[in-house]
Amino acid sequence: MPSRQRRLAAARAGRDPDRIAGRDVTDRPELLDRIVAIAGAAGDEIMAVYARAAAGLAINRKADNSPLTEADERAHRLIATRLAALSPALPLLSEEDVASFPGPDRQGRYWLVDPLDGTKEFIKRNGEFTVNIALIEAGRPVLGVVHAPALGVSYLAAEGIGAFRQTRGAARQSIAAAKHRPGTVWRVVGSRSHGGDRLAAFLADLGEYELAPMGSSLKFCLVAEGQADLYPRLGPTSLWDTGAAQCVVEQAGGSVRTLEGRPLGYADTGQLLNPYFVAAGAVC
């Protein structure tokens, strides 16, 4: 049914197709506030495990041999429960429950979640781990929250609103990606746990640079707030690793593109792995 006819039919039936469980998904400020709260609560679950992790942390292994902890599972359960209460009709794709995802809804919408991004950093206890929650529409992240509970900082963004950084107990501050100035050193942020020959070759072609290691999706956030010019990812990532942070970068004026120059997309949920990409500041 064409979109106009669908809307008319929905209106006659007393339904608004742009509302989820009575909430207007186009009301991005309210929705963003709610997702910030959910990410914060998930962070509290993670920190409850983190506080006693020094005394011993049980680590399981997934099929791909990546680590799984109690913190991953507790954060997933909280986020899944809260999102289901907020938007029961909207599908959820979470790293910790891929099998239950039915696919996007008819409008191409779904929640994309990594309950604990940077599990290796969590295990190392360096604080560089995040909660990632994104709203995807028609293959694009239109709302995203990246919460780093150990660091007490969140990065949040939504289409039409902008991108912000918020530290614990402080007001939100608008952030903007920086534009690299010709002749200056490239500020590059890279994975603390993944590097390899491809990254070395990329950096060799770049020219003069300085490389700062960082874990989890915080690498994107450094680009978004103008602290780095580039984040090249020339190794494996999944959709949930990038969706929320990509929204923050894009709403801050930066870009996240594949090596072929296309924006990183989320329409094909049958393919969970991302192609290689580069997150860049403003018009690099």
Image (cartoon, helix red, strand yellow):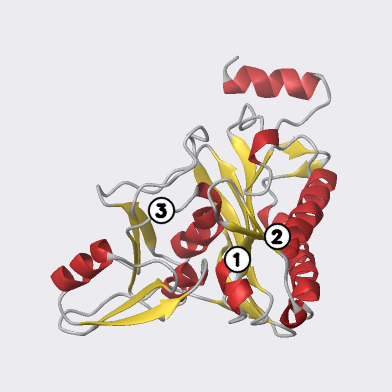
Task: Read off the residue under disc 2.
Answer: 72
Asked if disc 1 and disc 2 are in contact, CB closer than 8 Å, the reply is yes
Residue 155: image quadrant is: bottom right
Q: Is residue 203 visible?
A: yes
| Residue 96 vertical placement versus 164 (above, below) | above
Which structural element holds mark 2? helix
Residue 220, percent across and down? Answer: 46, 67
Q: Can you tell which mark lies on residue 252?
A: none
Residue at 57% across, 76% down:
128
Q: Residues within 10 Å of mark 3 (few under 14, many from 20)?
A: few
* Left or right: residue 35 compared with residue 252: right
Amino acid at circle 1: Thr
Q: Nearer the viewer, residue 274 or 252?
A: 274
What residue is at 40 percent from the left and 66 percent from the top? Answer: 194
Residue at 68%, 24% (x, y): give it.
7
When the figure is inspected, residue 160 is found, relative to residue 40, above or below; the finding is: above
The kind of residue tagged 2 is: Asp
Which residue is tagged 3?
Answer: 236
Q: Quadrant of the N terminus?
A: top right
Q: Earlier in the sequence, mark 3 or mark 2?
A: 2
CA gap, disc 1 and disc 2: 8 Å
Q: Earlier in the sequence, mark 3 or mark 1?
A: 1
Between disc 1 and disc 2, whose residue precedes?
A: 2
**Residue 115: percent from left, percent from top:** 67, 58
Cβ–Cβ below 8 Å for labels 3 and 1?
no
Secondary structure beneath dot 3 equals: loop
Assign a secondary structure to mark 1: helix
At which x and y percent is residue 36?
72, 65
Q: Amino acid at mark 3?
A: Pro
Mark drawn on residue 119: 1
Between 1 and 78, the one nearer to me in the picture? 78
